[in-house]
Structures are given as C-alpha cells and as structure tokens.
Amino acid sequence: MFKLSIYVPTYNRSKYLKECLISILVAIKGYENRVELVVSDDCSTDDTEYVVKCLMKKNSVLKYRKNQKNLYTDIHFTNIIENCSGEYFWMIGDDDKITSNAIKVVLSELDKGRTLIYCNYSVWTKDLEHLVNSNGFEVKEDIAFNDHNHLLEQIAFSMGYISSVIGLKQHFLNVPFVERKKFIGFTMPQVYPLYVGQIKDCKALLLKQTLIINRSNNNSEDRWCHIFINGSHAIFNALQKKGYSGKSVKKAHYKVLINYVIPYTVESKMHKLVEHGFLSYLFKFYKTYHLFYFVCLPILLIPFPLLNIFRKKVRSIPRILKKYYL
C-alpha cells in the first residue's frame, strides 16, 4: 500500500493539466515508492489523453484512468477516494500547481500520524503571471488540532478546496454511502466524512507554508449559491447532529458569510448581477446572523447611484470584516 495517493481529477482542461502534472512530477522525485500519482479523466473530449500519455513516456510513476462516461464531480471524486491505493488521499485540482517541496513536507507530517492535513495556498491570476495573495489562509504559524470543534471553526467550508486537503481514506469509508449521498450535488463529497472522522480521531494540521499554487477566477459561478450557501448549511447542520457543538457550527457559518457570501454579494451588486429574490434567499439562511442585517441588507437595498459614490468603501467591507471577525 502506498502512504499517499495523489489523484488529479480532470475534465477538458488539457490547457492547464500539463503544468499541474509537471509540478507534481518534480515534487514526487525520490518518493515514487511511497506515493502513487494518477490522472482520473472524467471522459474528456479534448486532447487530455494525449497530453497525459506524452508525459507518461518519460515518467513511469504517472498513471492514467479514463471514465467511460462523464460521472460529474461528486461521483467522480467519490470513486477516486474509494478506489485509491493509499492510506491517505490527496486530490489536486487540474488547474493548480504544487511547490517543489510539497510532497516532502506532506509525507513528513503524515509520518507523525496526522489524521488530516490542510495545506495553505498562494493565489495567482488566471494566467499564473501575477501573485494576488501569498498566504491564502492568512495564518502566521502551523496550527495543530486535537479538538474537532476547533478544526471546524478554523477551516469551515474551506475543506471543500480539494487541492489543500489530505485526508485518511478510512475516515471517508467509515461513513456509509447512504449517509454521504445526502450531500451529493454540492461538488465536495469529502467535506462531511472528513469532518465526521475527526470527531473521535482528531490529529489534524493546518500548514502555514503555502504548498499550493491556486489559479484564481477559473471556475463557473453558475451554481455558486447552491454550493456555498445551501451546501455549507446542509453539511454544518448535519455535523451538529453528529456531535459538533452549536457554537463551533455557528462560527463556521460566520466564516462562510464573511469569506464567501458577503464578497459575492458586494461584487454582484457592483456589477448589477443581483438576481431577483436573492435578498429573501439570504434571509432564509442568515436571518439569525447580525451581519446579514448590518452588511448584506444595506448593500442589497442601497440605490446603485449612491453605491457608486461609495464604491471604494463598499469594496473594502469584506477585507475589514476579515480583519476584525476572523
């Protein structure tokens, strides 16, 4: 058995996939006997297969699997985790890259018996030409967790960013599929079972060091609300029933509100993209949260001409909230 299975799920992204794989192949040198590397192709129609097989000719560690039909994200990711050979799994986004020392650092921590590792990341422009944020998770030191509630409060819905998450395969499998399938549709099938696994076995780590190079603004926003608002509420509320404290769940909801919902609301309003009924939709989920009334409500109700006058100040709201609330 490998210590670590690295899978790169992909679909029609050959343009970025080669860069991603080359970064992993550089980092994996010297650890080929401990790490498997597999591209899992969800039935791409572009030249993905050709790109991967060209790399395979010079890199025997690289393997390729192609689904016979498109399985969509949740089932694709679930199949990867259930069928990987490693004790731990690490899915890396096909448009991201990792640093040259990433695998060395991760294996060193896994050998200490970590049950979960969350890798920090740097954020870059879509072309990877310009650095946007050198410390995406904004931590100054490594944080070790032995309390699952503390873990949820810190990581919250960021557990959905697959490139940063290294989890125990057994923790995932310990949650029956009939329980996991309730969350199919949110494109993050690893979030709920990995959090459940920490309830009785929490030896998790948040790394300060940025091991992931994140390509920003490269995903469709079509289902944003369904994933981030509906998804986070469904998963966090289920975790509370499973044994997480109400206090930690509420803090996790606040993190989603500050990190995702409010920035999304600001940008949607700025670009006149607020959909009809969005205010009542937010009220349904956040009516007990004071930030809804003091931030979301005024932003959505303010007339656009007045908003334009205070454009810079409104755009600074998410940054200010992160500074004082997180």
Image (cartoon, rainbow, N blue to C red):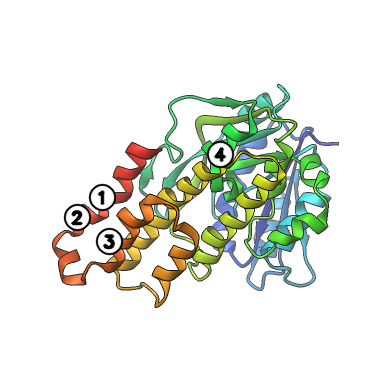
User: Which residue is label 3 attached to?
Assistant: 298
Answer left or right for 118 relative to 313.
right
Identify the amino acid type marked 2. Answer: Lys
Res 64 visible: no
Q: Nearer the viewer, residue 139 or 27?
A: 139
Residue shown at 47% from the left, 24% from the top: 141
User: Which residue is label 1 attached to?
Assistant: 316
Q: Which mark is residue 39?
A: none
Specify the farthest residue to the bottom.
276
Mark 4 or 1, nearer chain start:
4
Residue shown at 59% from the left, 45% from the top: 159
- The alpha-carbon separation of the residues under discs 2 and 3 comes to 15 Å
Image coords of residue 285 (percent x, y):
50, 60
Q: Secondary structure at mark 2?
A: helix
Q: Secondary structure at mark 4?
A: helix
Q: Secondary structure at mark 3?
A: helix
Identify the amino acid type marked 1. Answer: Ser
Residue shown at 39% from the left, 78% from the top: 276
User: Which residue is label 4 attached to?
Assistant: 248
Specify the farthest residue to the front.
288
Mark 2 or 3, nearer chain start:
3
Identify the amino acid type marked 4. Answer: Ser
User: Which residue is label 2 attached to?
Assistant: 312
Image coords of residue 315 (percent x, y):
26, 55
- The alpha-carbon separation of the residues under discs 1 and 2 comes to 6 Å
Task: Name the mark nearer the viewer: 3 or 1.
Answer: 3
